Image (cartoon, rainbow, N blue to C red):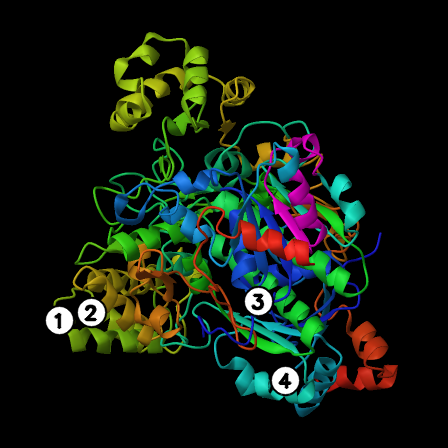
Amino acid sequence: MTGTAAPHGPMHGLRVVELCEEVGEFAGKLLADMGADVVKVEPPGGSRTRSYAPFVDDEPDPDRSLFFWHYNTSKRSVALDLDGEEGREAFRRLVADADVLVEDRAPGWMAERGLDYEDLRGDNPGLIHCAITPFGRSGPRAHDPATDLTILAGGGPVWSCGYDDHSIPPVRGGGNQGYQTGCHWALITILTALLYRDGGGGGQFIDVSLHAASNVTTEAGSYQWLVAEETVQRQTGRHAGVNPSGPTQVQAKDGVWMNTGLFPRRPHEFRILIEWMQELGHYDDYEQSPLLEVAAGMDRMLDMGRAAEDDEEAALLSAGREAMIFLVQRMDAYDYFYGAQERGFQVGIIYAPEDVIEDPHFIARGFRTEVEHPELGRSFVYPGAPYAFQGSPWAIMRRPPLTGEHTAEVLAELDSA
Amino acid sequence: MPKALAGYRICDFTGQLAGAGATRHLAAFGAEVIRIEDPVNQGRWDILRGQPPYKDERRGINLGGSFNNHNVGKRGITLNLRTERGKELLTDLVRVSDVVSENFSAGVMDRLGFGYDQLRAIKQDVVYVSSSGFGKQGPYGTYKTWGPIVQAVSGLTWTSKLRDLEPAGWGYSYMDHTGGYYMCIAILAALHHRNMTGEGQWVDMSCTDAGATLTGPAVLDYTVNGRPTRRDGLPDSNHNRWPPMAPHAVYPAEGEDNWIAIACRDEPDWHALAAEVGEPWTGDQRFATLDGRIEHEAALDEALCGWTTSRDKFATAERLRAAGVPASAVQRPGERIDHDENTSAWGLWPTVRQTDMGDVRVDGVPAHLSETEWELEHGAPNLGEHNEEVYGGLLGLDADEIASLREEGVI
């Protein structure tokens, strides 16, 4: 499913110039891994993200940053000094020949160098220029400093994430998701503009705001207010809500946390649970097992609404819930996850990234993507595809580039064009 | 202004946010998205249909607030695929569509007789995009999920926590949004590929795969260096190590459950913050270098808490930003929606008219396009609201035929 060289990815033939660091370089990766020819323009000393840890074998070096590696697969690198006229001229020629320019420079940066959309479109009316900035190109805070943390704090996600105990600060989810969400929106809008061009339309300028992107990526956080002016409150490991809900995280015998998901409500679900507990030899030690029998013998599904006023309904629901938790605590997390899901129960093991890459399902889907690094004489496993294109496969076409590795090659292509 | 996706027709079976969220963006740019719902259960396969929040005291299948948000700009028809006539009508609809999109459980489309092989027999270059929790292929293909389960299994819940505490996770279905974004990208990319080559295809999406692409550097630190994230009380996601920044966290502010996020990217940021704080501890030798601030991060955070805790979150954040330091109030929904010029004045919360609900605000698109701007005018369709338009106008059935379809329970 991944890694095959032919046929090409769906973006094959698309020429992209990327002028991005940590905010936008994920957008370039998404295009490049779908087959686009993405030329990353870096300053002569290399992109700042080459200095970000972690490094291969913990040896800091611009060509050994795993942070840079992840976000720059399948690209070529051209080193240009955009503060000098020679570099700017090469950049203009590069863009004149491209379908898409994606950049994450601060508002004003491109215009100061004569490299903004208005400067570039003359030589290339079909150009799609996408700018990704913290607050959009205009507006009262367009020039304010921001990072992933402050974007997610101001944009809504942090308000909804954290713990039941509100004396603990709310939490930013890891992995620079504020930047990545902006890049997802860059892709959606770039591809939309490209389809417009496919149909005979011209190029255009796209202004993506990270702040706005986070604001529309909060589910109930936004629509609960937009529709009903109600405010959700954060809860440990589960949806922030207007009204509190019951806990859903339990630690398994091996210490790994489990999302307990949905508990049994239908008679056949109780029957399956009873048989599973018997198989594991835990049925007889469970104090409420007679209640499970009652629930399994019912002729209807238990009703959460009814439990509020009906003690027996509440007791039966609680017996099922407690039985699942009783099992989690006596099993290793994976055994519980596998056993429960195989029996139709919706539960989730709380994997760390290192667990995901070793999981049999991800392995079977080809998620582990082997990439050769001839410069180190080694190959490494990268995360794989977010989607499985059956006719035009996603692939890491080449390892992330060394600093300026393709400068001569790309400039020679321009000369011969 | 022209619509970028005018002329593209989507035969859309998606629901909830993970699916419906994908095709809503196509509608915002002018694609004709025809949402197909089952008349027998009143479209309740999508568990959000008719569900809260509600705009007023009225309740009903067409009045659900989240359903409206996720389905703005689409058309809605009813179609009973248990009937032969229903299957014929779907065949006619597929024949005139560019895309078939769905996020049913694995196997449902095949059982209905509309798996990819059947779809391409009807329309050779169809783009078929399916999305589910674990994808159609692989050993967990039949496993059940919703957002929090996807986030748990893909590593996103674990990487959202504070030191030594249990996972905090994402307080909402982040992967329903993001699964929808990836599904939308897949549809658009497959359409471009079709435009270039004349070839359609099937794209199988797994939301857990999609989620697992969002923790890349941590995966590489494990596969390359053998270093897991399960160690030393980590993860600790309000702090930042790639690159290292300190101070970098969420600090208490004046008032109940008020917080401010502050991030010092480099030495100039730290010196600017220290000058604004102006308290003796900022000169503590332990904090003089980045390495020192990282080593003594707990003491640093505690000291900074002492300064922030009696201060207004908005005024303090503004003051720090003016000094060049990234800072932001942790905004509540009402604050960022009704009192933030960077959203409201930016046009992020358009008001749409839903036929039964009336005027209601929805999430907009977080980008502006100079030539083909997005537009959301109409709310989500009522159940079967566009039956006449689609069966009559598009498929050419006359009024009597449509009436008898309704009588026979086909639509």
Which residue is denoted by mark 2 in the rendering?
A: A289
Q: Quadrant of residue B67?
A: bottom right
Q: CA distance from mark 1 to mark 3?
A: 40 Å
* Of residues B356 and B76, the one drawn nearer to the viewer in this rendering: B76
Q: Are marks 4 and 2 on the same chain?
A: no
Q: CA distance from mark 4 to mark 2?
A: 49 Å
Which residue is denoted by mark 4 in the rendering?
A: B119
Residue A333 magenta = no
Q: Find out whether the residues at labels 4 and 3 contact each other: C-beta distance under 8 Å.
A: no
Disc 1 secondary structure class = loop
Which residue is denoted by mark 3 in the rendering?
A: B46
Q: CA distance from mark 1 to mark 4?
A: 52 Å
Q: CA distance from mark 2 to mark 1?
A: 7 Å
Disc 4 secondary structure class = helix
- Numbered label attached to residue A284: 1
Residue B346: x percent and y percent? 70, 37
Q: Are marks 2 and 1 on the same chain?
A: yes
Residue kind at label 2, given as amino acid type: Ser
Q: Quadrant of residue B94?
A: bottom right
Left or right: residue A329 versus residue A94 is: left
User: For mark 1, does the 10 Å Cα neighbourhood hold few (<14), some (14 to 19), or many (20 or more) residues?
Assistant: few
Residue A134 in the image: above or below residue B84:
above
Highlighted range, magenta = A88-115
